[in-house]
Structure formats: structure tokens, C-alpha cells
């Protein structure tokens, strides 16, 4: 978490005034352990909140202006609360602006303006949910500042997702915002995304560590490939309604049902997308059972199966992510490795024996740089709490 004293000094340097009334809030990033591209298909996911994320300092203003700034981004701005239109030129600020707009649509209009300074520890474009972290910390902090002491974090996640879908224009599922808002230390969340039925699962990795490896290849969630995959899944549902008239989402089907009715999908690419989603949904449930049985080897194998499906069926990995996973699986002591997040760059997550973590860093770093010319960044990750106010 950011140094709050240093961040407070930066806040006062930027906005002036005194320190009275400044409050601090923190929302984590998230890592999805397994279950990729199942969220917007109504399937199951298995994310966990990280111990690093986005810290927000906020102070009331005497007018109806929203002043936004970041320690990570050069762009800053002051906006009228009654005219928060989306503007591509506002870059990252569209995320908090969208949250303010959609809070108002759900009956939580702001009574006054605020000065807000963000400090993020999540690399932008890494696939660790920097956007969801900003959205959730903004919504939670504003609700608390407006006097809502008991924030419904499930509803907050839904409002944040809606802001990203409708205001920013990224058709993301609910997983990122839900994990950021509802995570718990040393637990992962088994979440069914169509109903939001969920339960916390203790995450005991025994003598292993979860290591996140960032490709350092920038990718944008709004890329057309992401929305294209979503459209292909919707097309698969339309084809399958011949046999399942009430079908709404691919996550409602089993692998056996798809096998029995695959002939209804004439487009080979659309069939591959559907097969990944439906089989990945089954892998999530098997992975949770493996963890609950302390079978880390089985969990690791499912991670690898997930990555290969994302590579060959959903086609969202790319040479950088594949190079990281291939290098990881060549290191003794690695039980499993896979991409995490939307893909096309971003990060992998690997389950590594604790006594092999340093060897993992050296070997994977060397092989990856030789193959791609890029230098990866490693995070030995801790599992933390969801959004909260910090002293």
C-alpha cells in the first residue's frame, strides 16, 4: 500500500488547503486463479484480491467540482458534477467520472464536490484489474464521504461494472469489480457470475507461492478482440437455442451438452470459443475441489489446461504470454502456470514451490527476454482484503 504520509503531502501540494477532512481508502488489484472469459458468459470464476492496489485520498470541496489527479498519470482535470460527459481526451479519468454518473443513476447523487488523488501500484494494462480497482475505491470512498457507513459491496461491484460497460465502453464481466470489492485475506472467491452466488474458499498453498509475472507488453481492454470474443459467444448461444430455447448464457451448459449439440454451430471459430467457455467453467469447479482436498498437483494441472485452452480455443494469449508459461513449466518446482486476465499481454500466475521461487525468477526471466526482447516483472503475491477505509 502507498505511503500515506507521503501521499498526503502530495495531496496538499497539488490541491492546497489544510489536512482537515482528508480521508484515505484502498482497493486491491485481483488475480484470477482459474476461470478466464467465463464471467461475461455466466460461468464460474475463482479470483482473489491482492495486497497491492489503488489508494485514494479525498477531501470535500465547497463547490460542485470534481478535481481528479493521479501520482501515476500526468493528466489531471477539474469537472462540473452536473456535466460529466465521457471524453476520450480525459483518458483514465473517465473511470471515476463514470462511477460518479452511475452512482447518481442508482440513487446516490453527490451532494458536493471533492478533491481526489489516486496512487496506483497495479501496472496499467497488466490484467490485474487496475480499472476495477479505481472504480471500486472511487465508489466506496464517495459513498462513505456522503454518509453511507454500511456500503453494500455486492451492489457497489455491479454499479462499477455498469460504469465500465456503459460509460467507458468496455464490455467486461462482473468478476474484477466483485473480487476487488469483496475479497478477503487468505481466501479466494468462488463466484457464479450470472447469479452472483459466491463463497469464500480458504487459500492454502502449502509450501508453494503464487508468482505473478508481468509480460510488460501493454494491452488495452477496449481492444476490438475482447469485444469480438464476447460477440462470438453470443452468436454461439443464438445457434444453440435451437436445442435450448431458454438458453441465455454459455455458462448454463455442460461439456456433454455442447458435445451432443456441436453440430448446431456451423462456424468452427464460434464453436471453439464456446468449447473453451464451457470446459473452463468445469475446470473452475474441479480446481476448487482440488484445493479443498489439498491436491496442489491437480490444481496445477488444471491451470495448465486452462492456459492451453485460452491459447488454442479462445486464442487470447499471444507469443509473450505463451513464452512465459512455457518457460515456467520448464522450471523444476513449478506445479502450474497460466495467463490471467483478458489476455493479449498482461500477466501469468504460477504456482511455484517456495524454495524454487528465486530459480524461477532467474530462469523464466532469462528465457523470456531471449525470446521476446522484453524484461518481465515478478510479484510474489499475497492475498489481501477487498476495498476498505485506511487510517
Image: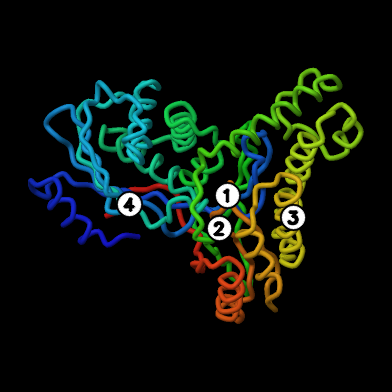
Q: Nearer the viewer, residue 57 or 371?
A: 371
Residue identified by numbered label 3:
308
Question: Cα distance, mark 2 to mark 4?
Answer: 22 Å
Q: Residue at x 61, y 45 (%)?
A: 199
Residue 213 position by quadrant: bottom right
SS label for mark 3:
helix
The residue that label 2 is drawn on is 347
Which residue sits furthest left?
17
In three-dimensional space, the C-alpha distance between marks 3 and 2, rounded to whole angstroms, equals 15 Å
Quadrant containing the N terminus in the rendered view: bottom left
Q: Residue at x 49, y 64 (%)?
A: 382
Which of labels 4 and 1 is toward the front?
1
Q: Which residue is mark 4?
A: 55
Q: Nearer the viewer, residue 386 or 62?
A: 62
> In the rendered view, does 84 fall on the left or right side of 37?
left
Q: Is residue 108 above or below residue 191?
A: above
Write the residue at 65% across / 64% down.
323
Of pointers 1 and 3, the one earlier in the residue sequence: 3
Is residue 178 shown left or right of residue 337? left
Asked whether disc 3 touches disc 4, contact meaning CB atoms under 8 Å apart, the reply is no
Q: Secondary structure at mark 2?
A: strand
List x then y, in percent, for residue 36: 65, 46
x, y percent for residue 217: 51, 57
Q: CA distance from mark 3 to mark 4?
A: 35 Å
Depth check: give the residue in front, 148 or 382: 382
Question: x and y percent of residue 117 in the render?
Answer: 25, 47
Distance between the Cα atoms at labels 2 and 1? 7 Å
Label placed on residue 350: none
Amino acid at each position: 500500500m502507498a505511503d500515506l504520509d507521503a501521499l498526503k503531502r502530495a495531496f496538499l501540494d497539488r490541491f492546497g488547503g489544510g489536512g482537515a477532512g482528508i480521508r484515505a481508502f484502498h482497493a486491491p488489484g485481483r488475480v484470477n486463479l482459474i476461470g478466464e472469459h467465463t464471467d461475461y458468459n455466466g460461468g464460474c470464476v475463482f479470483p482473489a484480491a491482492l495486497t497491492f492496489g489503488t489508494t485514494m485520498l479525498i477531501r470535500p470541496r465547497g463547490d460542485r467540482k470534481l478535481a481528479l489527479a493521479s501520482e501515476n498519470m500526468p493528466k489531471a482535470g477539474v469537472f462540473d458534477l452536473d456535466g460529466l460527459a465521457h471524453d476520450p481526451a480525459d483518458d483514465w479519468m473517465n473511470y471515476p467520472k463514470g462511477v460518479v454518473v452511475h452512482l447518481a443513476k442508482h440513487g446516490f447523487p453527490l451532494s458536493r464536490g471533492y478533491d481526489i488523488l489516486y496512487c496506483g501500484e497495479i501496472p496499467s494494462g497488466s490484467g490485474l484489474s487496475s480499472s476495477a480497482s479505481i472504480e471500486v475505491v472511487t465508489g466506496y470512498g464517495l459513498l462513505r464521504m456522503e454518509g453511507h457507513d454500511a456500503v453494500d459491496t455486492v451492489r457497489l461491484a455491479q454499479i462499477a461494472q455498469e460504469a465500465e460497460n456503459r460509460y467507458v465502453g468496455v464490455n467486461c464481466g462482473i468478476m474484477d469489480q466483485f473480487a476487488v470489492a469483496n475479497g478477503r485475506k487468505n481466501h479466494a472467491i468462488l463466484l457464479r457470475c450470472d447469479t452472483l452466488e459466491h463463497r469464500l474458499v480458504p487459500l492454502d498453498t502449502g509450501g508453494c507461492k503464487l508468482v505473478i509475472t508481468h509480460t510488460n507488453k501493454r494491452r488495452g481492454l477496449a481492444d476490438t478482440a475482447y469485444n469480438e470474443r464476447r460477440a462470438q459467444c453470443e452468436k454461439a448461444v443464438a445457434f444453440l437455442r435451437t436445442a435450448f430455447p431458454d438458453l441465455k448464457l454459455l455458462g448454463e451448459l455442460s461439456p456433454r451438452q455442447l458435445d451432443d449439440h456441436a453440430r448446431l454451430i456451423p462456424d468452427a471459430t464460434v464453436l471453439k470459443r464456446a468449447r473453451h467457455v464451457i470446459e473452463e467453467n468445469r475446470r473452475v469447479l474441479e480446481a476448487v475441489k482440488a484445493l479443498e482436498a489439498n491436491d496442489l498437483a491437480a490444481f496445477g494441472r488444471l491451470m495448465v489446461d486452462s492456459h492451453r485452452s485460452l491459447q488454442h480455443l479462445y486464442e487470447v494469449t499471444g507469443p509473450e504470454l505463451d513464452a512465459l508459461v512455457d518457460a515456467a513449466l520448464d522450471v523444476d518446482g513449478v506445479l502450474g502456470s497460466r495467463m490471467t486476465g483478458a489476455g493479449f499481454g498482461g500477466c501469468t500466475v504460477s504456482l511455484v514451490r517456495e524454495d524454487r521461487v528465486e530459480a524461477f525468477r532467474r530462469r523464466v526471466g532469462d528465457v523470456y527476454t531471449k525470446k521476446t526482447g522484453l524484461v518481465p516483472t515478478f510479484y510474489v503475491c499475497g492475498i489481501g482484503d477487498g476495498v476498505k477505509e485506511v487510517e
